[in-house]
Image (tube, grey):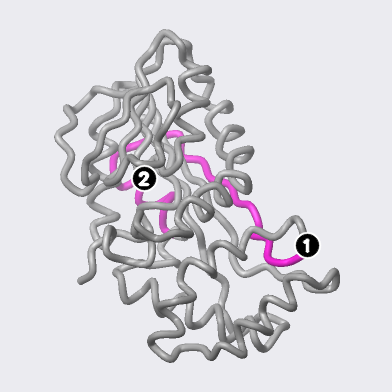
Amino acid sequence: MTRYTDSALGKDSPTEHGRLTSIQHAADAGTIAVIEALDPRPDWDCLDLGAGAGSIARWLTQRCPLGRVLANDIDTRHLTDLGAAAQQADLTDPAYAPGRFDLVHARYVLCHLPEREEIVRRAASWLKPGGCLVVTDPYQLPAETSPFPVVRRIMAAYEQVYAGHGADLHWARGLPALLAASGLGEIGYTGTLGRMGNLDQDRWRPLVAQVKPKMLAEGLIEQSEMDEFERLLNSSTFIDIPQFTISAWGRALG
């Protein structure tokens, strides 16, 4: 199976930074609200798994100035000006000690890894008593339910590309149950709607651009369909909801 570094999310892609910043702009407010509700203390030690371009790690250094923030990613080239420690490591095989962190956070990364459920179970063990694990991932709505025919075709192709890399864009529905089964308590969860179109509110242009070469090369879509999609994105009447995002959290007992 293709590994994360060689997939459509590889850091060598010229559109990767745009994809990461698009995610940050769309998701940071919700992520921060979830973590704030857990009442983090200034001395919390935090681990940000798959930190991407580092916006949450940067925020955590400000929110927990007396603690330590570790930003993990398989490729740290986009983790600049953090104010936190960056660690280049494959999160499928990290050497973190049990009971080390007050907060472990992972956003839009575990859905892409076949080992996702095992990583959640191990991450739960890295928490100190009372520490919190927060996981955020997308739940893709069925492509055929879009009101726009070209979006149906593009989103079906989008999901097919990611499935070929070991991703599961539906697994997030089981996150609350998985956290509970991993020994955590005080389970909570919430969701936010994805935004496609609506002009400057769109966050999907860079996400589709990331996988466009793969979709075209494999014959999953035609260039004419991509051209039609681009025209839709420039239309004020184009608004769609391709997915929603689930954030789930739990607290270590004891």
Q: Which residues are magenta?
A: 174-198
Which of label 2 and label 1 is nearer to you? 1
Identify the mark at residue 179; answer none if there is no mark. Answer: 2
What x and y, as percent, mark residue 2? 23, 69
In this view, 150 is above or below 186: below
In the rendered image, the vertical position of residue 61 relative to residue 210, given as above or below: above
Q: How many marks?
A: 2
Q: Around disc 2, counting alpha carbons within 10 Å, would you say few (fewer than 14), some (14 to 19), or many (20 or more)?
A: many
Task: Give the left or right position of residue 193, taking residue 132 as reference.
Answer: right
Q: Position of residue 163 (x, y in %)?
A: 36, 74
Q: Residues within 10 Å of mark 1 (few under 14, many from 20)?
A: some
Which amino acid is tagged 1? Leu
Given residues 207 and 116, the one toward you in this image is: 207
Give how far across and how far down residue 239 sits, in percent: 76, 69
Q: Residue at image x 68%, y 76%? A: 230
Relative height, residue 75 to residue 69 (above, below): below
Q: Secondary structure at mark 1?
A: helix
Q: Which mark is residue 199?
A: 1
Q: Quadrant of the N terminus?
A: bottom left
Instruction: Mark 2 or mark 1: name the one nearer the start of the chain.
Output: 2
At x 76% / y 56%, what residue is drawn?
Answer: 200
Q: Quarter holding the C terminus?
A: top left
- Look at the image and say whether residue 171 sits in the magenta stretch: no
Which residue is rendered at x = 68% and y = 66% of the image? 196
